Image: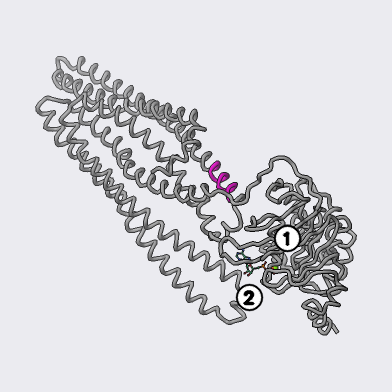
Amino acid sequence: MKSLWYLNKYLFKYKWRLLLGVVFISLNNTFNIFIPQVVRYTIDSVKESLTTYYLFEQDAFSGFANDIGATTGKLALIAGGTIIGLAILKGFFLFLTRQTIIIVSRLIEYDLKNEIFDQYQVLSLAFYKRNKTGDLMNRISDDVSKVRMYIGPAIMYTANLTLLFVLVISTMLKVNTELTLYVLLPLPLLSFLIYYVSNIINKKSDYVQRQLSTLSSFTQEAFSGIRILKAYNREQDSLFSLEQECESYKYLNLDLVKINALFHPLMLLLIGISTTLTIYIGGILAIQGEITIGNIAEFVIYVNMLTWPIAAVGWVTSLVQRAAASQARINEFLNIVPEITNSNMGSSDIHGNIEFQNVTFDYPDSGIRALNNVSFSVKQGKSLAIMGRTGSGKSTIANLIGRIYDISNGDILIDKTPIDKINLDDLRSNIGYVPQEVFLFSETIANNISFGLTEIDVSKKTIEEAAKNAAIYNNIMEFPDRFETFVGERGITLSGGQKQRISIARAIIRSPQILIFDDCLSSVDTETEEEILNNLKIILQDKTSIIISHRVSSVKHADHIIILDEGRVAEEGKHAYLIDKKGIYFDLFKKQQLENS
Ligand code: ADP
Ligand code: MG
């Protein structure tokens, strides 16, 4: 249960509303408790009147008897009116109760979701490597809803039960202790049984939920992989697997329905036992003259009033247990201290001098040594090209400059300041990064390009300019909706090269001080590559640029080139120097020349 303490800060935040809710609950119960008393009073009065009526029914007194009859009728009418009035008042306060407490639970749900999402955003990439997307989604949606059930219904019913219990039991005890005890006897059993059944129901619904996730993941994968599926002629197979998943979903659901069906009859059975006991024991007591007939009617209503709240004890207990487990899962993520934190709250001017001094880096999750004693420096406004085989550590350098990871050994200096002493937001907003694997949002092309800009209204011209410089403008103008074309799931499918160029436009539109292009021209033909590089020359004039590529044509104009091999710098220098050196670079150059001729 300890995990739920985390929510106390939220309960505290909304304390006034919650308190108001409790006030409404008391009012609701107060009016509720009057109803049985009115019923008792009416029945007893009517019974008494009737006895008198029959006594005076003989001819001589019929006038008097008629008077009594009329009065009794009036009394019954007034009693009926009072009960309706009380019920309306009770309903009104019940409405207000829900309006306060359930709304608080929704507000806390909202706060908690935001808190979790905020935390997700500051957690490092290593965290995302360790945890599956589905798990992250579940904790922010499923688990939060379960926690909400604790705050809303659980708190509401607990407050309700406590108040009702005190009010009803004290009233009952005033009437007759023996009857009260007998009537209440089956109720704890009810509470326990409901708890037991709800637990089974919860467990089974979890199975159903899990199978549903499996089913949706399966179908989602089938749809996204539909091209491969068709190409390999596996439709029948896929259908067969789907049928199997559906079949187990069906069985799990039927299983759940069976136990669900037990819930209500069980409650009714126990209410029935209580009512029978009330009438039987009450009858004996009434014969003995200890209580009136009206008391029996009153008690029957009390029993009915108590059953749901008492059953709710069992239900609420299982809700709280589930909520505690969910909150524990949520806390697990909330308590992770982000590895990369902003240590400088002041602002940092970024000019773009980058220096690596004997940098050694191991990936925290896999322990793979990606960089080994790497040193280089790029001055503001200059360009550095990085070449090397796949897995040689090129993308790692790009990640480190953006401080996606912190290094194990050595120093990275930006404008002569250690990278971890620089304001992280300033650093990242001054870097234009074109990742190796392009990611476009299911959004319009214009929104994809202007993604990194914080202004709400980005001028059309700026977007078009960026598109032109990335040599994608003409392609975009050929789409039916031009810049408003939707990308991805709901829209057009772009070729690899087109995606890369949109990604480049996204980076350069911010005109950041540092630009990193991670192998972003790999899917572009040499002619377009030439065009882009020419455009970039103008843009990059006073910016620092890091160009990662495996094509000599992309890197040969760079101010400095380094060749990485298994995380070490194997060769470095300018194009001409490296050609003369006749090493790895020269071999690559020769090979690529042959391919192009
Ligand atoms: P390149 O970009 O030159 O192809 P990378 O910098 O991506 O190479 O990778 C260098 C090494 O680090 C490789 O051995 C790769 O397996 C490993 N590596 C890359 N990214 C990760 C990661 N996120 N977690 C663990 N290991 C990684
Ligand atoms: Mg790479």
Q: Is residue 518 above or below residue 192?
A: below
Cβ of mark 1 under 8 A from ligand 2: no
385 and 42: which is toward the camera: 385
How many discs appear?
2
> Mostly what secondary structure, the magenta segment?
helix
Q: Position of residue 284 (x, y in %)?
A: 11, 32
Which amino acid, by three-letter code, is at mark 2?
Answer: Arg
| Residue indicated by mark 2 | 227
Secondary structure beneath dot 1 equals loop
**Does the segment drawn in magenta span residue 229?**
no
Screen quadrant of the N terminus? top left
Q: Quadrant of residue 232?
A: bottom right
Highlighted magenta segment, given as a residue range: 110-120
Q: Quadrant of ligand 1?
A: bottom right
Q: Which residue is at a point 58% across and 50% down the rendered structure image?
A: 338
| Residue indicated by mark 1 | 486
Which amino acid, by three-letter code, is at mark 1?
Answer: Phe
Q: Quadrant of residue 357?
A: bottom right
